Image (cartoon, rainbow, N blue to C red):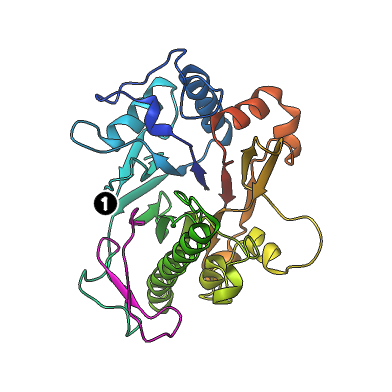
Amino acid sequence: MRLATYNIEWFANLFDRDDKLIVDDSWSGRRNVTKAQQVEAIATVLTAIDADAILIVEAPNTGKSQNTVRALQEFAETFELRTTNAIMGFANETHQELAVLYDPARLRVRHDPIGDRETDGFAGDAPRFDGEFRIDLDIDATEDIVRFSKPPLELAAESSDGFQFRMIGAHLKSKAPHGAESRDALIRISIANRRKQLAQAVWLSHRVKAHLDAGEPVVLLGDLNDGPGLDEFENLFGRSSVEILLQTGLYDPHAAQACRRRPGWIPSTARFPRPEEGQYLEALLDYIMISPDLRARRPAWRIWHPFRDEHCWSVPELRDALVTASDHFPVTLDIDL
């Protein structure tokens, strides 16, 4: 089975209020990319990765007239993808939903949120992801109350061969200091964002631990917006969100490589333009982490990076589509389920 995570930048902009695709020459949310170009590129990438289930990070919006599931299923039908079904969890107000496109012949899934919305979290319990988590993150005797702007998607999944596992899709808080108008504001916002992101990672780790203690296989995938050593504010708290999740026993080889913190090549799943510098910034942000029991099932990870993956580079149509579709690249996991 192939599982995938893919953050598709501004996917919501490609649908009208009735969830119909907008395929024209107007600009998409992507820099210098039209809606028609981005639509075609996304379809090319999804067709190429050919996953049985794909977590779509920044999926189309659910709102007064829009519906994420309807939009994704119409996209799949338009481009004859075999992932004809879609499922989502709690809707949010950011126009960036979490949803899974999947092949119903290969996988059965249902939204299965766990936890009590009122649990405080201090006893190691994890509240339901649409609730509140209370934590003293930096031991300053001040209680932090944390909410997810994008509640993680919790699925009870079963393969066509009857293997049952938990699938958790996440998009953690961005650390970017949006709105900062001075250096003091930048520092203040950056620290506040990192505090919230780490608290979300702790909350998520509590849920993972509960599943592992119950002997349930877990796949955690998505955009964690973090990795060891990505910014100077990490030293204030001693560890990254990724390290918090790895400490539960989860494993991702790209995360493990980054955690070694030795000079050398670091994997990358995202590429952001820096027009003022005439360069691009690359970062490892997207992961597929698995529980220890799943490591015995011949897992193989792949980052579909247009310039680092040999196959992606050698197929110009795919290479160009990966660059056009999003500022993130898909990550896939092939595993015997």
Q: Dot 1 corresponds to which residue?
A: 90
Q: Which of the 4 image quadrants contains residue 252?
A: bottom right
Furthest residue in direction top, as rendered = 25
Q: Secondary structure at mark 1?
A: loop
Residue 71 horizontal side relative to residue 80, left or right: left
Query: Mark 1: few, some, or many residues within 10 Å (few <14, many ≥20)?
Result: some
Furthest residue in direction right, as rendered = 263
Q: Position of residue 287 (x, y in %)?
A: 55, 55
Residue 315 horizontal side relative to residue 207, left or right: right
Residue in the foreground of this view, choosing between 138 and 81: 138
Residue in the foreground of this view, choosing between 229 and 293: 229
Residue 244 horizontal side relative to residue 159, left or right: right
User: At 66% across and 37% down in the image, what residue appears?
Assistant: 276
Residue in the foreground of this view, choosing between 337 and 147: 147
What predominant SS class does the magenta segment belong to? loop
Q: At label 1, which amino acid type do we have?
A: Phe
Instruction: Answer whether residue 142 is magenta in the image.
Output: yes
Q: Which of the 4 image quadrants contains residue 64?
A: top left
Q: Is residue 154 visible?
A: no
Q: Is residue 288 visible?
A: yes
Instruction: Answer whether residue 198 is magenta in the image.
Output: no
Q: Position of residue 262 (x, y in %)?
A: 78, 67
User: At 25% across and 25% down in the image, what residue appears?
Assistant: 17
Q: Position of residue 199 (x, y in %)?
A: 42, 70
User: At 44% across and 65% down in the image, what residue appears?
Assistant: 192
The magenta segment is 129-153
Residue 131 horizontal side relative to residue 54, left or right: left
User: At 57% across and 51% down in the image, what residue appears?
Assistant: 333
Q: Position of residue 238 (x, y in %)?
A: 58, 77
Q: Which of the 4 image quadrants contains residue 259?
A: bottom right
Residue in the foreground of this view, choosing between 253 and 1: 253
